[in-house]
Image: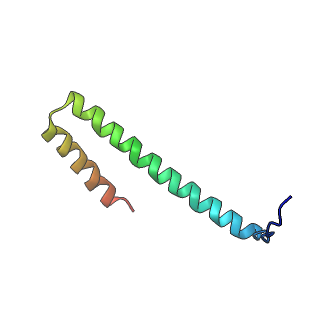
């Protein structure tokens, strides 16, 4: 076995924080991808202006949520 430098173990809190950050990043990417697929599906069945109107209405609803 070669002379490898042994790296110290990370504290459990660091590992938990890294895991939580990576999970959040994955969920964000997956959510955006899902949204893109939904918009693409809408575009196959509706006119562009209809899709834009629906998305604008949804965006307004989201802005009003508290």
Residue 26 coordinates in the image, percent (x, y): 52, 52
- Quadrant where the N terminus lies? bottom right
Relative side of 45 to 30, left or right: left
Which residue is more in the foreground, 47 or 56?
Answer: 47
Residue 5 coordinates in the image, percent (x, y): 79, 70
Residue at horizontal 31 percent and vertical 60 percent from the top: 63
Which residue is more in the foreground, 1 or 50?
Answer: 1
- Quadrant where the C terminus lies? bottom left
Which residue is more in the foreground, 57 or 10?
Answer: 10
Q: Residue furthest top?
A: 45
Q: Quadrant of residue 22?
A: bottom right
Q: Residue furthest front?
A: 2
Q: Does residue 62 sit above or below 13 in this rendering?
A: above
Residue at horizontal 83 percent and vertical 62 percent from the top: 2
Q: Does residue 27 sit above or below 37 in this rendering?
A: below
Relative side of 17 to 58, left or right: right
Q: Does residue 12 sit above or below 36 in this rendering?
A: below
Residue 35 coordinates in the image, percent (x, y): 36, 43
Residue at horizontal 14 percent and vertical 34 percent from the top: 47
Q: Quadrant of residue 53?
A: top left
Number of on-image labels: 0
Q: How is the image coloured?
A: rainbow
Q: Quadrant of residue 7?
A: bottom right
């Amino acid at each position: 076995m070669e002379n490898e430098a042994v790296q110290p173990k990370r504290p459990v809190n660091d590992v938990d924080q890294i895991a939580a950050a990576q999970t959040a990043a994955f969920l964000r990417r997956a959510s955006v991808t899902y949204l893109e697929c939904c918009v693409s599906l809408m575009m196959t069945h509706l006119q562009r202006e209809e899709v834009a109107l629906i998305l604008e209405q949804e965006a307004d609803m989201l802005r009003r949520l508290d």
